[in-house]
Image: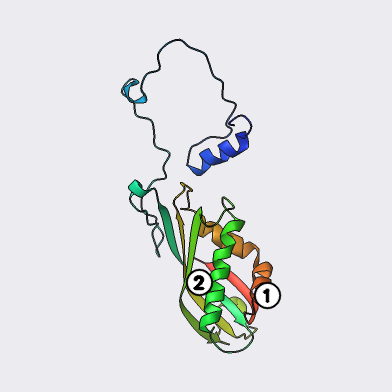
Amino acid sequence: YINSNLEKVTADMNSRFLPVTNAQEVIIFATNEPTASPSLIRGNHLPSISPSASMSNSPVFAPSRSSPTNGTLSVKRECNQILEVEKPGKFTEVQVGIYELLMQSYTAEFGFMVSTPQIVTTCEVITQELAGGRRLLSRLLQTPKTLLIMKFTMEYESRYEYDVEDYPRQFQTYINSNLEKVTADMNSRFLPVINAQEVII
């Protein structure tokens, strides 16, 4: 299995912060000597491959890790996204739910390319502020637009040893690199969005 999946093994090592450029084939040597218990080899301890549970420098939400006894890893971040909408008005409760489900659905498009049950994603809209034609950003000065500012959290949780610490950044990168698609996805779900702008974490 290892020798047939060397690229995956290398990627798995990198995702666990091992400084490996290229993992090569495994070679098994026959020996008649009894195998020593790992805990008895020169008193050394094998390094854990579990990601560090140290706190992040993020000013919003630090990665939260549950106790290793249940094998769950989780991370949560606060995000903002400005949407240019068709007319002044906040999303209805149903539209907020559609927006949350859409943000959650993108989890399968990056990272390990998996979603529930391997990685459970929760998007929760905290507030939405209708900005109207106010001059919020310098790049919008010459074009008054009806803007809706969405403030929400993205939480990623895994019980299958997937390292999700970097998932909020990967979510941001995916959205910001596919704004036309995201806008089209919103339109196909009947959200009154003219232009979805970048996510800021």
Nearer the viewer's eye, disc 2 or disc 1?
Answer: 1
Is 86 left, or right, of 94 in this rendering? right
List x then y, in percent, for residue 109.
61, 57
List x then y, in percent, for residue 98.
56, 75
Q: Which residue is mark 2?
A: 80
Q: SS class of the residue under badge 2?
A: strand
Q: Is residue 149 above or below residue 53?
A: below
Nearest the eye: 111 or 32: 32
Q: Which residue is mark 1?
A: 188
Q: Amino acid at mark 1?
A: Ser
Nearest the eye: 137 or 150: 150
Q: Is residue 131 above or below residue 201?
A: below
- Give the residue at x 64% y 62%: 177
- Quadrant location of the N terminus? top right
Q: Amino acid at mark 2?
A: Asn
List x then y, in percent, for residue 141.
61, 82
Farthest-out residue, front: 117
Residue 43, picture quadrant: top left
The dot on residue 22 is: none
Is 127 left, or right, of 42 in this rendering? right
